[in-house]
Amino acid sequence: MSTRHVPAQIGDLPPIGRPANGALLEAGITTLAQVATHRRRDLLAMHGVGPKAVDLLAAALAEQGLTFAS
């Protein structure tokens, strides 16, 4: 799947790369609050979402006082 038409940044998510953004958009995830409802391992299981993207999301969640679901 081409990520050429995927935005570089979506909602209040940090810039995590187009492949990861595409995977999150496909899953209907566009905000940090929505990210917080998912487990780290579930995000990593999405094609295009790697450890670096998840670490960036974790840092952004922490800044908002949020964490991944357990």
Image (tube, rainbow, N blue to C red):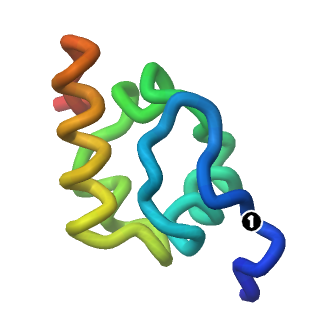
Q: Quadrant of residue 2?
A: bottom right
The residue drawn where x is 21% and y is 40% is 58
- Amino acid at the residue labelled 1: Val
Find residue 56 and report its horizontal and vertical position in percent.
Answer: 26, 50
Quarter of the rendering occupied by the C terminus: top left
Q: x, y percentage for residue 34?
A: 49, 27
| Above/below status of 38 relative to 53 | above
| Quadrant assignment, res 43 | bottom left
Neighbourhood count class around disc 1 (C-alpha, 10 Å): few under 14, some 14–19, many 20 upward: some
Between 67 and 10, the one nearer to me in the picture: 10
In this rendering, is residue 37 above or below 5? Answer: above
Q: Quadrant of residue 50?
A: bottom left
The residue labelled by disc 1 is: 6
Q: Is residue 34 left or right of residue 8?
A: left
Residue shown at the point (67%, 51%) measured from the top left: 25
Q: Is residue 6 left or right of residue 61?
A: right
Pinpoint residue 54: horizontal percent, then vertical percent. 27, 55
Q: In the structure shown, which secondary structural element does the residue marked by tag 1 occupy? A: loop
**In x, y percent, where is residue 5?**
82, 71
Location of the N terminus by quadrant is bottom right
Q: Which residue of the protein is positioned furthest toward the top in this rendering?
A: 65
**In the image, is 33 to the left or to the right of 30?**
left
Residue drawn at 19 percent across, 53 percent down: 55
Q: In the rendered picture of this protein, how many numbered marks are placed on residues?
A: 1
Q: Is residue 58 left or right of residue 27?
A: left
